[in-house]
């Protein structure tokens, strides 16, 4: 089985100096999504080359707008899953001066590790975010015949497993999924360890090992489909 993780295109976080918690894509972000759709629809393009069975997407506006041209190119309906949402920021930030969010993030970077798990004031706790994302994936995979064993790095896969799934989500969500699937201890800053630029691709494939299977990370942050001027972090 292959899982293709897509980060959404460039979002318009700031409008007239004010923060948007659920932003739309920028003009460049929409161009990124179109280039990404073209790559996914071409069965000869590595690292994704072959039939795509499922297209799942975060309900956030930036993810849905990224998934739209992909769904059209593939002829697939995108299925929305709430657990794919990014770490949720405080509701009070919406339409506030962008400096409010910038100052909070700057202060967070200097906090000790154990405090990171609690997250920012008024935001979703990072520990809850990890549980939401990992638990949501486990539930969906189980429905497709893919289950973790007692060993967190080994998985059982039966004949119901799809060949390939594309998920359109977020930097934090995708990095958490990578850590979960390859069996490494999670960190409250996984998005710093497994960095993906906008509209980039990560690919994980199952490999038979030790009477079960592991997830192998075959690509991370691949943006070869994007024009040089359209590559953003």
Image (cartoon, rainbow, N blue to C red):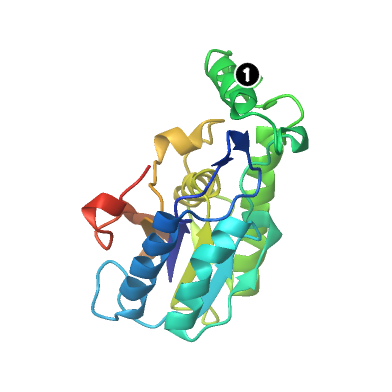
**Identity of the residue drawn at 65% across and 34% down:** 126
- For residue 212, say whether it is visible: no
Looking at the picture, tell me which residue is in the foreground, 134 or 110.
110
Is residue 103 toward the left or the right of residue 71 in the image? right
- For residue 151, say whether it is visible: yes
Which quarter of the rendered picture does the N terminus lie within?
bottom left
Which quarter of the picture shows residue 200? bottom left
Looking at the picture, tell me which residue is in the foreground, 228 or 139.
228
**Identity of the residue drawn at 54% across and 18% down:** 106
Is residue 134 toward the left or the right of residue 128 in the image? left
Q: Residue 94: give x, y in percent of width and height.
A: 71, 38
Q: Residue 195: give x, y in percent of width and height.
A: 39, 41
Q: Residue 50: give x, y in percent of width and height.
A: 33, 81
Residue neighbourhood size for the residue with mark 1, other residues' Cα within 10 Å, grouped as few (<14), some (14–19), many (≥20) = few
How many numbered dots are placed on residues in this image?
1
Looking at the picture, tell me which residue is in the foreground, 16 or 108.
16
Determine the secondary structure under disc 1: helix
Whether residue 114 is situated above or below residue 201 in the rendered picture: above
Which quarter of the picture shows residue 120? top right
**Identity of the residue drawn at 62% across and 50% down:** 134
**Identity of the residue drawn at 28% across and 59% down:** 226
Is residue 126 toward the left or the right of residue 196 in the image? right
Which quarter of the rendered picture does the C terminus lie within?
top left
Is residue 183 toward the left or the right of residue 219 in the image? right
Most extreme residue toward the bottom, as rendered?
75
Q: Residue 217: give x, y in percent of width and height.
A: 35, 54
Whether residue 135 is situated above or below residue 39 in the rendered picture: above
Give the residue at mark 1.
114
């Amino acid at each position: 089985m292959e899982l293709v993780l897509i980060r959404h295109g460039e979002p318009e976080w700031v409008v007239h100096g004010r923060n948007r918690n659920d932003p739309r894509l920028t003009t460049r972000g929409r161009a990124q999504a179109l280039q990404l759709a073209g790559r996914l629809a071409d069965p000869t393009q590595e690292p994704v080359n072959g039939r795509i069975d499922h297209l799942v997407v975060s309900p956030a506006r930036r993810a849905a707008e990224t998934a739209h041209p992909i769904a059209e190119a593939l002829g697939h309906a995108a299925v929305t899953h709430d657990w794919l949402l990014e770490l949720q920021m405080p509701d009070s930030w919406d339409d506030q001066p962008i400096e409010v969010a910038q100052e909070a993030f700057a202060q967070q970077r200097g906090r000790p590790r154990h405090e990171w798990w609690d997250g920012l004031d008024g935001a979703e706790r990072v520990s809850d975010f990890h549980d939401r994302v990992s638990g949501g994936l486990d539930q969906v995979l189980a429905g497709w015949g893919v289950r973790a064993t007692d060993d967190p790095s080994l998985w059982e896969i039966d004949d119901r497993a799809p060949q390939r799934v594309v998920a359109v989500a977020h930097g934090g969500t995708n990095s958490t999924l990578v850590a979960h699937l390859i069996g490494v201890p999670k960190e409250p800053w996984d998005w710093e360890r497994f960095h993906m630029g906008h509209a980039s691709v990560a690919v994980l494939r199952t490999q038979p090992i030790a009477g079960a299977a592991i997830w192998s990370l075959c690509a991370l942050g691949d943006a070869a489909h994007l024009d040089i001027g359209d590559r953003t972090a």
